[in-house]
Amino acid sequence: REGLEISALLSRETPDKLTATALQLKVLFSPSKEDGCNFGAGVGVVRARAAGDSENGSFINGIASCNGTPLGNVHFNLGYTKPSSAKGVKSWGAALEREMGGVTPHIEYFGVEQSKPVVQLGLRGDIASNVQLDGTVGRSDGVTAWSVGLKFKF
């Protein structure tokens, strides 16, 4: 369906051996525009595992994207994340991406309330019709994290 995305994510933080998986459903409220802004929302679930312990949670994000700016495509989001065993926290993010042929490099800066922000660089591209592969590497508070994700577009 136009305007609907389902995303799956697997990430690994190497020093603490933290592995996270997530599933997200994203809906666009306005049609995606090549030159202009559009808005949407995402909801999802996440599971994190480290040293035999695991934590489940859920999240919701409001999304604003402005495409075709002189810098490339600019994205902002505000969200709320609720771990199963803790109080919920607010989240925020900003990203810049620029398509270059068949791949799109991107830089992101995001954070969660009461934590240090993360900066990460990544690259993504289509690997099949309506299937996208995304890889990133980032740093926060001296810790390196990487992720590999697949996005299926309907």
Image (cartoon, grey):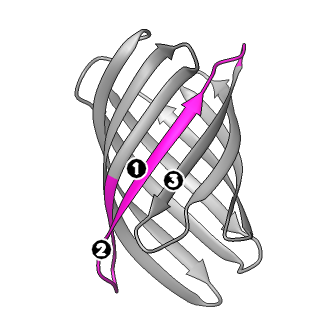
Q: Are marks 1 and 3 in contact (CB under 8 Å)?
A: no
Q: Secondary structure at mark 3?
A: strand
| Measured Cα–Cα span from mark 2 to mark 1 | 18 Å
Residue on which disc 2 sits: 88
Neighbours of disc 3 within 10 Å: few (<14), some (14-19), many (20+): some
Upstream in sequence: badge 1 or badge 3: 1
> Viewer-nearest of labels 2 and 1?
2
Q: Is residue 81 above or below residue 65?
A: below
Q: Position of residue 32 (x, y in %)?
A: 36, 18
**Amino acid type, residue under disc 1 in the picture:** Gln
Whether the magenta-drawn stretch holds residue 138 is answered as no
Q: Secondary structure at mark 2?
A: loop
Query: Residue at 64% across / 18% down in the picture?
Result: 99
> Viewer-nearest of labels 1 and 3?
3
Query: As drawn, which residue projects farthest toward the left?
Result: 29
Residue on which disc 3 sits: 110
Query: Residue at 39% across / 28% down in the picture?
Result: 65
The reply, left or right, for residue 125 in relation to residue 55 is: right
Q: Position of residue 85 (x, y in %)?
A: 34, 86
Q: Are marks 2 and 1 in contact (CB under 8 Å)?
A: no
Neighbours of disc 1 within 10 Å: few (<14), some (14-19), many (20+): some
Upstream in sequence: badge 3 or badge 2: 2
Q: Position of residue 86 (x, y in %)?
A: 33, 84
The reply, left or right, for residue 23 in relation to residue 70 is: left
Residue on which disc 1 sits: 24
The magenta segment:
79-102
